[in-house]
Amino acid sequence: MRILMVAGSMHVGGLENQIMHLLRKANKDIYQIDFTSDKPDAFFRQEIESYGGDFIELSYKSRKQPIKYSIEMYRIMKKGNYDVVHAHELFHSGLTVFIAWLAGVPCRFVHAHSWREGHEIIPKYTISRKLYHNLMRFLIIHFSTTQIACSTWAARFLFGKKIMKKKSYHLIYNSVDISKYLDNYYKEEGGDYCETDGWRNVINVARFCGLKNHIFLIELAKELKNKNKKIRFLLVGDGDDEEYKKNIVQAVNEYHLKDYIKLLGLRDDVDSLLRKSSAFITPSKYEGMPLVMIEAQAAGLSCVSADTYSHEVDFDLGRVTWLNLSDDTSMWIKAIENAISMERAPKELVMDAIRKKGFDSNIFAEKICGLYNQDFEQRGKK
């Protein structure tokens, strides 16, 4: 079965990590999974190709040249003779599945990963933007054959309430490779950033952009410094927004926060850094269902999070504190201190929560591939 993933650049991010779980776990003898990208040096390119997937570079970006982009995508889909097109680009997925329909692709999937767009807590939608949403939702409803969402909030935002009542709609939570966390649950880490120097680590994993709201962590670090608290933030991630990252670096220098803010960049040892930390924090302005929140809980950490996305991500172990971004910084500091004072969750309870909610990447891949098979049996090429 030939599958084409349309998910932006496939560079770095929670969405991309989630799709890679599917690629890693899917049976390569049954599923050929290819990817389009507008970024030739995408972070995941080498791994995609190592699993036998084609990495298809796009010549045209949809936002700048939508007609040329559509023609190019049509040709890619026709040439690839795909059985499934799986779109992950929010409202833009409407155009993707319409092109897939024109190209004769029988199974057309749309996957909702977020419940908001833009960097504002309350985004302002222009008339043209509303018209675009309505048109794209119309195309999704009429030309997709299967709809998937990582949370009910994401589903409601992209698909609307009516489609959530259809048999073609499926709620499938994001997942993690649990072996990284459960197999090493009690491992004692060494090296940099261990808490043997009197400091406690609170980790954040996110790409650098306004949506992830790192500037909020700067304000918290200033407060921690004023109170002479030996609590530091480990910021893991990078991003394409160089100006935003530059502003964060400048703020760290301006307020003399180098002891309180550690900029670690892209890392391939996030699981190890989680084990070296006492708590996890995310002040994002919104999320679909953050993969790193699942990873943090899988590592047994207590979490402090902005109340800006579905609580379905919560393992329900009493170790997540939800706060409003408008709450006073003193409330956030108190929540952080409470989080780092808690012992890690018992491994057995973590395992049980992962199994019940389906947060295991093996379960995620099994469900998605099952839907590919089911849809293809109904609509596959004759």
Image (tube, rainbow, N blue to C red):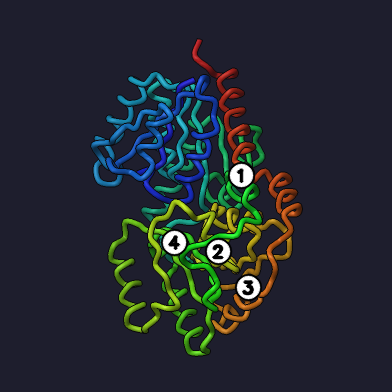
**Helix, strand or loop under label 4:** strand
Query: Label 3 neighbourhood size at 10 Å, few (<14), some (14-19), many (20+)?
Result: many
SS under mark 1: helix
Q: Is residue 71 above or below residue 127?
A: above
Q: Residues within 10 Å of mark 4 (few under 14, many from 20)?
A: many
* Residue at x 56%, y 37% (from the top left corner): 147
| Contact (Cβ within 8 Å) of mark 2 with mark 3 | no
- Assess whether mark 2 and mark 1 are in contact (beta carbons under 8 angstroms): no
Residue 59 in percent (x, y) is at: 23, 36
Q: CA distance from mark 2 to mark 4?
A: 13 Å
Residue, disc 1: 179
Q: Which mark is on residue 340?
A: 3
Specify few, some or many for label 1: CA neighbours under 10 Å numbering under 14, 14-19, or 20 or more: few
x and y percentages locating residue 118 in the rendered image: 41, 59
CA gap, disc 4 to disc 3? 19 Å
**Separation of marks 1 and 4 at Cα, in angstroms:** 21 Å
Task: Say which residue appears at 55% left-offset and 44% top-offset.
Answer: 159
Q: Which mark is residue 236?
A: 4
Q: Which residue is mark 2?
A: 276
Marked residue nearer the N-terminal end (2 or 3): 2
Disc 3 residue type? Ile
Q: Earlier in the sequence, mark 2 or mark 4?
A: 4
Q: Mark 1, mark 4: which one is toward the viewer?
A: 1
